[in-house]
Image (tube, grey):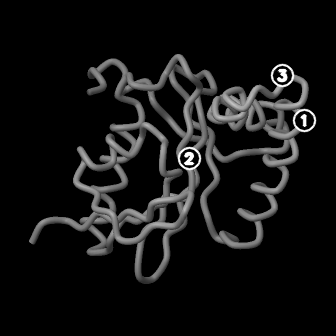
Amino acid sequence: MADQDTEHSISLRQVDAGDQEFLLEVYKSSRGDDLRGLGWDEDRIDEFLGMQHQAQQRFYQNDYKHADDEIILLAGQPAGRLIVERRDNEIRCVDLALLPPLRGGGVGTLLIRTLQDEAKQANKPLRLQVIRFNRAVTLFERLGFVRTSETGTHLHMEWKAPK
C-alpha cells in the first residue's frame, strides 16, 4: 500500500506531443520478457516492440476516442501512463503502466482504488482487460475484480461496488 507521502506526491497530467519517447519507454519496459524467453536478440526485440507500440497507439486512437490519456507523475517526475475512458455504462481502465522501479510499491493500487471510488460514486462498473500472464492479475483480484471473460491472450475483468 502506498504510504501517505507517496499518495500526496502522485499526480496526473494530459499526455502531450513531447511525451512520445517516454510512452515508448514505458511500453517497452512492460513487455519483452516473453520475447527474450524465445531467444530473440535485444535489437530484434526493440524493433518489434517499437512496431507493437505504434499499433497500440493507433488502436487506442481509433477505439478510445474519448479517453483521458495521462502521464502518471510521482513527485513531479514521469512514472507511467494511465488511460481511462468514462462511458455511459462503465468506466474503462484502458491502460495502466508504470516504470519497473515503481511496480509493486502501491502506486498502481492507489490509482485503481481512486478509479473504484469514482465508479462507486457514478454507480458504474470499472472494467479492464489485462494480458493473461501479467502479474497485475493478482493485484486486480486482490482489489475485488472478477474475471468476466477471457481470450487466448487476455482476461476481461470487472469491479462493481458492493451493494
Q: Quadrant of the C terminus?
A: bottom left
Q: Residue furthest left?
A: 163
Which element is circle 2 on? strand
Tag in front: 2 or 1:
1
Q: Quadrant of residue 58?
A: bottom right
Report helix, strand or loop for mark 3: helix
Residue 60 found in image quarter? bottom right
**Left or right, 99 with reference to 126:** right
Q: Position of residue 118 (x, y in %)?
A: 33, 60
Q: Residue at x 25, y 65 (%)?
A: 120
Looking at the image, the residue that sits furthest to the bottom is 88
**What separation in Å lies between label 1 and label 3 (alpha carbons)?**
9 Å
Q: In this figure, which residue is indicated by the disc labeled 2?
A: 82
Q: Which residue is mark 3?
A: 42
Q: Residues within 10 Å of mark 2 (few under 14, many from 20)?
A: many
Which callout, 2 or 1, points at the residue further toward the start of the chain? Answer: 1
Please indicate whether residue 160 sits to the left or right of residue 150 in the image.
left
The label number, if any, that marks residue 65 in the structure image: none
- Residue 38, by quadrant, is top right
Relative to 128, 77 lies left or right: right
**Type of amino acid under label 2:** Leu
The crowding category of the residue bearing disc 1, from other C-alpha atoms within 10 Å (few below 14, some 14 to 19, many at least 20), is few
Answer with mark 2 or mark 3, whichever residue precedes in sequence: 3
Mark 2–mark 3 Cα distance, whole angstroms, equals: 27 Å
The residue positioned 84% from the left and 51% from the top of the image is 54
Read off the residue under disc 1. Answer: 47
- Of 22 and 154, the residue lying toward us: 154
- Write the residue at 55% across / 62% down: 152
